[in-house]
Amino acid sequence: MSDVPSAPNTHAIGLYINGEQHHLQVPPWLTLLDLLRDELDLVGTKKGCDHGQCGACTVLRNGRRVNACLTLAIMCDGDELTTIEGLAHGDRLHPLQQAFIAHDAFQCGYCTPGQICSAVGMAREGRARSRAQIQEAMSGNLCRCGAYSNIVAAVEEALPQMGGPRP
Amino acid sequence: MNSPLSGQPLDRVDGPAKVTGRARYAGEYPEPGLLYGSVVSGNVARGRIRRIDCDAALAVPGVVEVLHHLNRPKMAGDDESYEDADAAEGKPFRPLFNDRVLYSGQPLALVVAESLEVARYAGSLVRIEIDAEAHRTDLFAELDNAHDAPAELPGPRGDFAGAFEAAPFKVDATYSTPVEHHNPMEPHASTVIYNADGSLQVHDKTQGTQNSQDYLVKVFDLPKERVRVCAAYVGGAFGSGLRPQYQLTLAAMAALRLQRSVRVTLTRQQMFTFGYRPRTVQRLRLGADAQGRLLAISHEATGQTSRFEDFTEHLVEWSGMLYRCDNVALGYRLVPLDVYTPLDMRAPGAASGVIALECAMDELAQALSLDPLELRRVNFADSNGNEGKPYSSKALLDCYARGALRFGWHSRDPRPRSMQDQGELVGWGMAGGVWEAMQMKASARARLDADGHLWVSSATTDIGTGTYTVMTQIAADAFGMALADVTFQLGDSSLPTAPLQGGSFTVSSVGPAVRQACQALRGKLVAWAKGRYPELAGIDAGAFVVRDGQLQVAGKAYALEAMDVRVDAEPSARRQGFASATHSAVFVEVRIDEALGTLRVSRVVSAVAAGRVINPKTARSQILGGVVWGLGMALQEETQIDHGLGRYMNHNLAEYHIPVNADIGEIEVIFVDEPDDIVNELGSKGVGEIGVVGVAAAVANAVCHATGRRVRDFPLTVEKLLG
Ligand code: FES
Ligand code: FES
């Protein structure tokens, strides 16, 4: 395993991130998470474990929630990605962002972008309606500050404004 | 003037930044030419490095340097330089200092490269040969090697041995608590920006920017004015940021050597390679008369520490102060092991020590056939027996009453296994909680701009506690101004001195400094205005208002001038004759499926007495978070070590279990009124720790009520509930 790799082959990919088109050259091992954070300075997407264990890196890929740390950038050619930076319209916050503030659904804020993206994805899935279902469907997003009760309250409040499942 | 902002449940002022992803944390500051450091960790618990071979790593395109103990830049050679504001007694760990391997997971080299991926890959190519030596990591196997902890314990009072011997009702039980890791969601990170003039601008994950600054200044012998440490946002810490951690040392080391900007972010696995809550074993002996009055209390604890520092926490003191008792003996010993030094972790000492006390109280109530809540009422203490001083306030009886009412405690059938519902065993348990209400020196600056905006600052941090918001409220009230016209700045070592953010003393320490600075600035403004505008000379100071960018007095507007004031606040002198503490009563309902051994905590009521609450919304969140921590301590959290290897086995978030959303039932938080004009001028005691204290004991007590089984070894995992 100690052979030294030659300079990486990079591959051209095209992505829409928060509505903006990007043409990028990426090495094959670059994760979507590191692409967002280190190459594009979209640091709102967080890295809590890099192993798919915490949900801090949750983004929306073609409307579905995914762990960006488990997604290679090269897999996303042609995809539409929404990160936490893409949810608000200018100064107008997404209803869920508003609800998170109103219910104090965070403390340190580090899990928050992942929680919010995850809840937006969950709303589109259309499966979680009751409090218990929301709790189950949001259990892939850890919050060490323990803001869970308030996260559920915020999601419950904003759910009706999030349009439910996509047609 | 409008009604005060303090006491109102305002939204966080940093909320919009956090929900939009605009809030930047330590490892998120971009910088042209930034290099990435990846830490190479050892996997031997004790030994000496024989050889480090970096050739293969250095040959990887993009690798700039591999630093280790043989080629690192010069570092201080005395222990004092490594001692920080939260240092334990002993010889602090020095990263990459020499060939000694002191614990498994120790950083042994740092690969610095143009990208994170290259640095990490090259790290896997660094070959390190270690001459391993025999190691010891098991506290229970080493109890014979304990020594007295260098802690200032209250001396024995009365005659414990005699009173215990004579007591008609007794409990003698031993409890154990495991190693736990802080695991804030944000891994520790430091971005060190190397400025053109050679000065360092550091973004560090820390609970004390000035602590990190002092550390770098001493360790690398740098002029203080050339090191600035910032922490605008901290992604949780819970104590992990109280001491400068090694990623800071390594990032600074690399930046100084290479004269370039460097970032070092630890992996989640590496978050298990520094401080943690120590494993403890605790023996509790209680003696009581037939009415439940405590005649004798002894609390003897042994905790683990490293071989290089004696870490102490307030583990046993609570047993001498929560209840009234004349015969008390406390003991605290430490066992040094081949592990890293433990570190303060949310409610350090109390979170573990009160488990033993409050489980033993439940066992005593059972022995007496007395209601556990009644037992605590009978033993209420209005003075702190350790110090022989009355409490400045202690509304614990109200916590008992309101918590019990809300929970419905009166309808509890005391017999174990008596309450069942839909095939599940139901158990109700309760416990008390206590934490010190401290106050430290702190400074603040208040500055009024000519356009009427108030800027207030202090070098404290906001680790999710709500400091930005609460200080803004205090400042706006003290100056008499709208919230929107006030900005509070923190997290920068160049701001006025503040203590570490920990111990629940930020509001009570920094709050008075902020208040005094704003009051003084207001006084200065009034005096200036009366001189500048003679027609204001006779007008009462209360009529002066800053609004819409102007000074407004009696319906007329006047231009402002910029001015500022800096204040150093001291702990209130009135505290001297008193003891001060926060208290809580926690009530828990558990539901257990005995066939499967599954346990759910369906309800928690936490009633808290913490003096005056400045922001009920953020304070409630602190308590909610504390309760979640308590549930984790009760049921899940445990860092498991393979003593053969001397290494943690579950060092990741899939195997180190913390509560997830679906684990959390209903949690209700009650703040009882507790006026206190002694503790400090705000009457506030702080709420960061109290929420966790007592919760784990209440769960264990509820489990015993549900099943008849008393588990004394934490956490209460499934195998301990089955069979
Ligand atoms: S960072 Fe992707 S799941 Fe934790
Ligand atoms: S808000 Fe801190 S981890 Fe969730």
Image: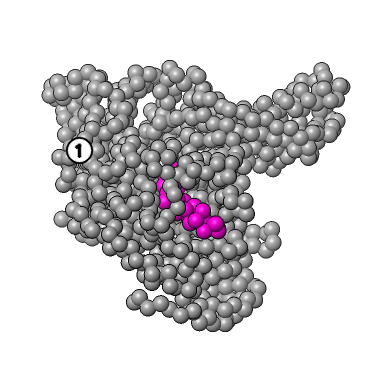
Q: Which residues are magenta?
A: B237-260
Residue B607 appears at what percent x and percent y?
Answer: 42, 37
Of residues B100 and A10, the one drawn nearer to the viewer in this rendering: B100
Q: What subunit carries mark 1?
A: B
Q: Is residue B529 magenta?
A: no
Please, which residue is most extreme toward the left here? B165
Could you say where residue A165 lies in the image, as x and y percent from the top left?
54, 72
Q: Is residue B250 magenta?
A: yes
Q: Position of residue B408 (x, y in %)?
A: 36, 40
Q: Is mark 1 within 8 Å of ligand 2?
A: no
Query: Residue drawn at (22%, 57%), measured in percent from left and top?
Result: B132
In this view, the residue in front, B132 or B221, is B221
Q: Amino acid at mark 1?
A: Ala
Q: Is residue B34 left or right of residue B564?
A: left
Dividing the picture into quarters, in which one does residue A143 lie? bottom left
Residue bearing the label numbered 1: B146
Quarter holding the C terminus of chain B is bottom left
Residue sitting at 57 percent across and 57 percent down? B29
Q: Nearer the viewer, residue A128 or B657?
A: B657
Rendered image coloring scheme: one colour
Q: Residue drawn at (43%, 73%), measured in percent from left and top?
A: B59
Q: Is residue B415 above or below residue B297?
A: below
